[in-house]
Image (cartoon, helix red, strand yellow):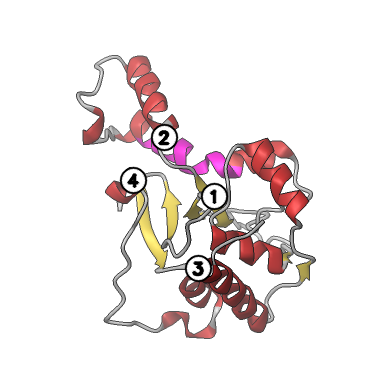
């Protein structure tokens, strides 16, 4: 599978930086056949940089610490049970639905909220099914799906509390895993690229 040069560069650099931290071991990267199976089975295509990152090596999860929200924060695209991966893929949408059901959230682009709770949830599910797919990178950090695309900001998704966690995949690895993650860069100004989700930032 041919991907863009810049997508390949970003993904390889993010993988190199993660390896340099020494925090994780790596299995061999995903093969073209494995990418094809995953994309067919789960109905999305990886962005070029995300694909290059996973083809460089598959990060191995550490034993979970007590109280850790995610027992396996790195999606195990090779061996995880399909229900686990579907749950990880569905996390952003399910989070919005929780906010609709319990916190009164409603996206203004959807028109007037139905008065009936069940009708509101049904309408929200319909709208969310049309929103771009987000693919988990690590725990509740996500990149948009989309072959031929790269350089999207990494988003941290917690119901409708969505924030930037990196201006791109390389910057994300730096901010999440490098020792320098506490550094503040005044010029840092990521721009979300993905419809609907960017409205919630």
Q: Is residue 82 above or below residue 34?
A: above
Measure the alpha-carbon separation of dots 4 and 3.
19 Å
Measure the alpha-carbon separation of dots 2 and 3.
28 Å
Residue 8 lies, in percent from the top left, at: 58, 69
Place residue 90 in its image quadrant.
top right
Q: Is residue 58 above or below residue 114?
A: below
Question: At 32% from the left edge and 21% from the top edge, which residue is drawn?
Answer: 120
Point out which mark residue 10 bears: none
* Mark 1, other Cα within 10 Å: few <14 / some 14–19 / many ≥20: many
Residue annotated with mark 2: 98
Question: At 59% from the left edge and 45% from the top edge, which residue is drawn?
Answer: 88
Residue annotated with mark 1: 135
Viewer-nearest of discs 4 and 1:
4
Residue annotated with mark 3: 169
Residue 149 lies, in percent from the top left, at: 47, 57
Say whether marks 4 and 1 touch (CB < 8 Å).
no
Secondary structure at badge 1 equals strand
Membership of 94 in magenta stretch: yes
Between discs 4 and 1, the one toward the N terminus = 1
């Amino acid at each position: 599978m041919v991907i863009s040069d810049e997508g390949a560069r970003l993904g390889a650099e993010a993988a190199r930086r993660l390896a340099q931290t020494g925090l994780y071991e790596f299995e061999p990267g995903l093969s073209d056949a494995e990418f094809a199976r995953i994309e067919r089975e789960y109905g999305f295509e990886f962005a070029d940089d995300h694909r290059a990152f996973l083809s460089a090596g598959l990060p191995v999860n550490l034993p979970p610490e007590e109280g850790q929200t995610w027992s396996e924060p790195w999606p195990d695209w090779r061996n995880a049970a399909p229900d686990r991966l579907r749950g990880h893929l569905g996390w952003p949408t399910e989070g919005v639905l929780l906010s609709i059901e319990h916190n009164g959230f409603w996206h203004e682009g959807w028109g007037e909220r139905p008065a009936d709770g069940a009708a509101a949830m049904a309408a929200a599910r319909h709208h969310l099914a049309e929103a771009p797919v987000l693919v988990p990178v690590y725990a509740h950090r996500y990149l948009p799906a989309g072959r031929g695309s790269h350089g999207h900001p990494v988003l941290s998704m917690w119901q409708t509390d969505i924030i930037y966690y990196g201006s791109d995949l390389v910057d994300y690895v730096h901010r999440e895993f490098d020792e320098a993650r506490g550094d503040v860069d005044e010029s840092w100004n990521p721009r979300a690229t993905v419809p609907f989700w960017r409205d919630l930032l």
